[in-house]
Image (tube, rainbow, N blue to C red):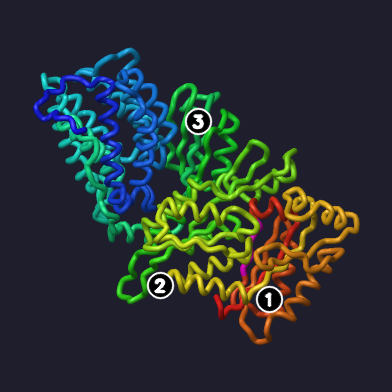
Amino acid sequence: MRLDFASMAIRYLDGTRLQKSFIAAANWVNAHREHLNAINVFPVPDGDAGTNMAATLAYAVDGIAHLNRPSLDEVRVALGRAVLVGARGNSGFILAQFTRGFLEGVGKGTRRLHRDELARACRKAFRRAYDAIVEPVEGTILTVMREWSRAVSNLSREPRDLGAILDGALERARLALEHTQEQMALLKKHGVVDAGAQGFVHMLEGISEFIHRGVLHPGRTEPAETIARGVLEAAGETGSLTYRYCTQVLIEQPGVGSEELKARLEPLGDSLIVGGGTDLFKVHIHTNSPDEVFALLEEVGILLEAKAEDMQAQTDAVAARRPVARTRAPVQTVGIVMDSTCDLPPDLAAETGIMLVPCLIAFGDEVYKDQVELTTSRFYEMLRTHPLHPTTSQPAIGDMEDVYESALGSYERVLSVHLSKKLSGAYQTAVQAAEEVDRDRITVVDSETVTVPMGTMGLQLARRAREGMGVEELVHRLEEMRVHSRLYCVLETLECLVRGGRISRLGGWVGQVLGLLPILTIQDGTLEAVHKVRSSERGLEEIFRRFDDEIPEGVSVIGVTAHGCNPEMARRAGEEFERRYAPVEMMHFEIGPAVGTHAGPGAWGVFYLTAGTA
């Protein structure tokens, strides 16, 4: 029901009005999220500012929407926690701190906010947001927050109703927003305003609509917007990011204060924001070492949430849509998504625009996202020292949906390639996520393989997608590559396969007693032992004997080696492959945590792909 507030002079905010105002603010941002994504240049042109702000506010709204005629105290407590827990992205974190500062300014036991109390809360809001940031930057959301808060404070000195105060402050915020181009050369160069600042102004517009007309929703969602040319240029010019991962951690019962946390974390990256209170902190940092951040924070409190997003991959995905001047090169319309069992090096995946969805690795109750919260080197160290053997599971459906939404913000279609459904539930998770997001634009395929073959084929698909190849052609190309390729790998131990249930316990026992090492391949989507040898040396001989029989003479091939803590055997296998077959491309992968859990330490393998099918 729409309330007719047009003729009402609003003198105060109570719990219900504050609740409804925040809901309206969230709805306005959500309605404009695609536009915010489309103008996202700073701090990284990765096209997700609107998505992050909308997600932050949506989580916060979930924390208060159920309250029936709440008091200010009820809103203050529920909203303060929800907006902190739900904070996402740089602007989302700043917004969360601003909101928590405002609520602190409201004060415990306050029943109504009149103009003086509103001004005090706004001053507290900006100070809280500003203090949470290690290196504040002008021309951003922070600048507009400051100007809006000052305007509220100045206008509250005269006897005005809240509607008039908020109207005047909104106009000041709009002027400050326009001025962000003059304050930051990057924005001016690319012809946009700061996306976070624009999102904050949309919040204020939603509040104004509710205060004046009782409107909680703009009534429509804007159509998906083409990414601004300036943003495409910014993404294309970015190159390798100084810090790759947007890392976010929620910590309960921290044993140190926010200033000490900042001091400890500052050497690990930039865009550092630390917010929260005595019992709960949330940290945002751009870093190259999310595992170091997680390890440091585990020492000071209980980690309730830890995540890291690959900004390089997101930026490269945006850059892939950038037209090249004075050429008629085809435009990429298909984004490639894969799960982390492809074992592609993260930098190579990012370079080619492949978006990776992490599988989950659990050491007892400790759960990590593959290659995001748990690097390969740390995994093998934990595999050696941890008292519990790890287990794996398919990516979380929420992570899959997030990647799909991000990809569809940059591409018309998405091709999502996953490990064999006979080995994992990742394929089915992807199908479910595609149904939730947009099944007409997302095609999910079973690669019928895993690790190096999957990664190499995905790499070729990404290259062809950049040349303008469509989904149907790409799927056909994948089918061709499956037929004209082969992986052989040797396991130094069967213990991990047995523990993971990938072979029978009897087969594992026999192999261990006889001292035999299996040579495995992937056939029809399952692991198959094709031979047993007594040493890796014999395994190398047997693998190349088989390759000599299988690789047609004179045919160009791509070669790939992979290993899990066995670089010497991978090196020898690579040198032998190059000597025998003179590949047109030779690559070297490490077996990551998701596959390494089952392959175990010491595993190594060699893969070939006929170049003509790539």
Q: Position of residue 321 (x, y in %)?
A: 36, 64
Q: Which mark is residue 3?
A: none
Q: Amino acid at mark 2?
A: Gly
Quadrant of image for the N terminus:
top left
Q: Quadrant of the C terminus?
A: bottom right
Disc 1 marks a residue whose amino acid type is Glu
- x 74%, y 59%: residue: 603
**Looking at the image, residue 122 lies above or below residue 317:** above
The image shows residue 115, relative to residue 237, as above or below, that is above
Identify which amino acid the numbered label 3 is placed on.
Leu
**Mark 2 or mark 1, which has the lower sequence index?**
2
Name the spot of residue 325 as percent of width and height, x first.
31, 71
The disc, 3 or 2, on the residue closer to the chain's N-terminal end is: 3
Kind of element beneath mark 3: helix
Mark 3 closeness class: few <14, some 14–19, many ≥20 residues within 10 Å: some
Mark 2: few, some, or many residues within 10 Å (few <14, many ≥20)? some
Q: Write down the residue under mark 2.
A: 468
Mark 1 → mark 3, Cα distance in angstroms: 50 Å
Which residue in the structure is indicated by mark 3? 261
Q: Quadrant of residue 518?
A: bottom right
Q: For residue 590: magenta?
A: yes
Q: Which residues are magenta?
A: 587-591
Residue 598 in magenta?
no
The answer to whether residue 568 is visible is: yes
Mark 2 residue element: loop
In the picture of the structure, the residue carrying the numbered disc 1 is 578
Task: Give the quarter of the image for residue 160.
Answer: top left
Instruction: Report how far apart the C-alphas of labels 3 and 2 lie in the structure.
Output: 47 Å
